[in-house]
Amino acid sequence: MGDISVGACSWTDPALVASGWYPAGRRDAEGRLRHYASRFPVVEVDSTYYGLPSGRNSRLWAERTPAGFRFDVKAFSLLTDQPTRTAALPTDLRPAGSGPAWVRADDGLRKEVWERFSRAVVPLREAGRLGTLLFQFPASLVPGARAEAVVEECAERAAGWPLAVELRHPGWWARERRTATAALLARHGIATVAVDTAQGLPTSVPPVVCVTSQDLAVVRFHGRSPAWGAGGKEAKYRHTYTEAELAEWLPRLRDMADGAASVHVLFNNCCADASVRAAEMMQRVLKRDAAFTVRQAQGLPPRGE
């Protein structure tokens, strides 16, 4: 059975930083990451969805975390078939003149952005800190021939890299479609991202577990807000998980751990410290069940030692 690593979908979210979860003396950039790594063995890098990462940051992240720590790096939005703010692009890649506020990538721009994105992540990979690259495809990517081509193009471009994919249109995991969806991802060795969200809404993705990579399976807990799929970030992700809600996932997590060498359990209910509190609770729930092997955080010595 594979091991399970539990963490949050960001350690730098402003709401988390302002919540008081980080103790005094650990609230600067280095201190926050060191403190986080002393509590959890994995984290998702959310900021790379909104702007391209830098090689310098990747090197610093590797230096500030222990050998067993893993970063799941979220792909830049332009690489996931959705419009991206022009201002998020490097200056030399922006359209000439005033240009549009939002851009969609053509093949040339996508190729250049991928090269810069992947090059910046190399230090994490070389240091053994990279868990996976996580591609979150939007609900606008409706299942069909074109959408399958988008996913396949992504896999071909990122050949040789560990990939995980979250598909946000619920149709991908409808009963009549899920076998074909799993086969598409398995064909390219892509790890499937299962999700926990509010159910019964038009945008609700069912909590389907499909292990499509022998190396990794991922689940992201987005919260169960009735505003999921609409409204602002605070409304969509506001949810405090209960122990009973987390325990519902134990049979699914067993299935994931039976099929993959590692399972990453990540909490994205990013309001105040709700994500890290839920992650701490999930660690306790899992540790009470002898069937699971739960990876422990190791941390680093304090600065100056």
Image (cartoon, rainbow, N blue to C red):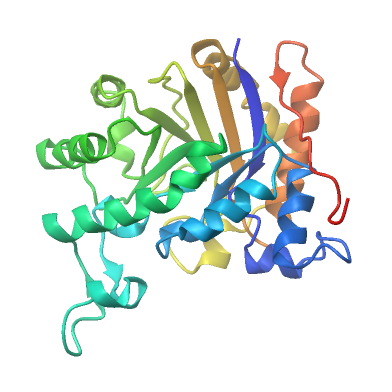
Q: Residue at x 57, y 38 (%)?
A: 129
Q: Residue 33 location in percent, x, y?
A: 71, 54
Most distant residue in the bottom direction: 98
Give the tally of numbered discs.
0
Of residue 210 and residue 121, the one placed in the foreground of this image is 121
Left or right position of 143 against 202: left
- Which image quadrant is residue 280 in? top right
Q: Residue at x 23, y 48 (%)?
A: 141
| Residue 145 in view | yes
- Which image quadrant is residue 127 in? top right
Of residue 151 and residue 274, the one placed in the foreground of this image is 151
Assign the N terminus to one quadrant of the image.
top right
Q: Residue 199 location in percent, x, y?
A: 48, 42
Q: Residue at x 23, y 72 (%)?
A: 93
Q: Residue 61 location in percent, x, y?
A: 61, 52
| Residue 227 in view | no
